[in-house]
Amino acid sequence: MMAGFSYPARWRASFVVALTALWVVASPTVLAGLFDDDEARRAILNLREQMEAQRQALAHQNDQLSRVGEENSQLRRGLLELQAQIEALRAELARLHGQNEQLLHGLAEVQDRQTDVAQGMEERLRKLEPSKVSLDGREFIADPAEAREFEAAVAIFRRGDFPTAQAAFSDFVRRYPQSGFKPTALFWLGSAQYARRDYFEAITNFRALLAMAPDHSRAAEAVLSIANCQIELKDNSAARRTLDELVKAYPQSDAAVAAKDRLARIR
């Protein structure tokens, strides 16, 4: 080498590559022959060390790249598994949501049925429970069945079926001796018997009404009916006494007005 002379950088690089090639293809003995001085030998050793270090670094990088690739593969597999689990959970949630909708619908139907049953029970209980009744100016408590039977007997009487009405009222009085309907039932029973010309029995039931409830709203009418029965039986004297009693006992009643007219006709 010439003192003070410096090779350009690209030449030095070419020189290094050439030396590397010689090192790769030549034996240490040949290389030593080319460079006899210590500086050349140190350069070659340094070059070898650098190449080895680069080789080891490259190998290390390859190992790291392999590990990163494996980790990436594992991560991708994990992500795929996680995605599959998420899809399975979504499907399960959809199924559970559907079941929940069915359960809610079923629960609503059960609640509706329970409400209907409860209302039906309340309605039946109301039909069975005693209730307050107002009849002929009187209020009393009566069972629903009792009220229905009385109303049915009255309906028969109003149709003009007096034999059946008589039987219905007789049965009612027998079955419900303490009923609040009984005074009125006795009146209609006597009226049915009067319509059938059963005057003696009619008088008996009208008097039973008066004995049970002398202040009943139909009491004056019952006394007038007794007088009518006596007139039909041709017992005018008894009829006059009954009519006189009616005028005295119920002077303000419509029956008293009719009694005065009857008295004028049978004297």
Image: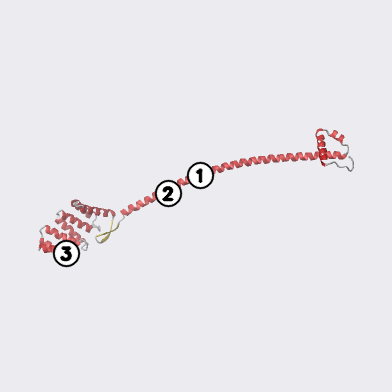
Q: Quadrant of residue 226?
A: bottom left
User: Mark 1 or mark 3, which is nearer the start of the sequence?
Assistant: 1
Residue 119: x and y in percent read 36, 52
The picture quadrant where one finds residue 5 is top right
Residue 168 is labelled as none
In the rendered view, tell whether residue 40 sits above or below residue 195: above
Apparent side of residue 36 relative to residue 144 in the rendered image (left or right): right
> Mark 1 falls on what kind of element?
helix
Q: Which mark is residue 257?
A: 3
- Name the residue type under label 1: Ala
Q: Is residue 187 above or below residue 98?
A: below
Image position, residue 256 (x, y; %) = 17, 64
**Numbered disc 3: secondary structure:** helix
Q: Nearer the viewer, mark 2 or mark 3?
A: 3
**Mark 1 highlights which residue?**
94
Which residue type carries mark 2? Ala
Q: CA distance from mark 2 to mark 1?
A: 21 Å
* Foreground of the two, 139 or 80: 80
Q: Are marks 2 and 3 in contact (CB under 8 Å)?
A: no
Residue that appears at 33% across and 53% down: 123
Alpha carbon distance from label 3 to label 1: 88 Å
Query: Would you call the spot at circle 3 few (<14 residues within 10 Å), some (14-19), or many (20 or more)?
Result: some
Q: Earlier in the sequence, mark 2 or mark 1?
A: 1
Image coordinates of residue 86 in percent, x first then y, are 56, 43
Q: Which residue is mark 2?
A: 108
- Residue at (20, 60) in percent of width and height: 209
Categorize mark 2 by other alpha carbons within 10 Å: few (<14), some (14-19), many (20+). few
Please name the residue shown 78% across and 39% down the image: 52
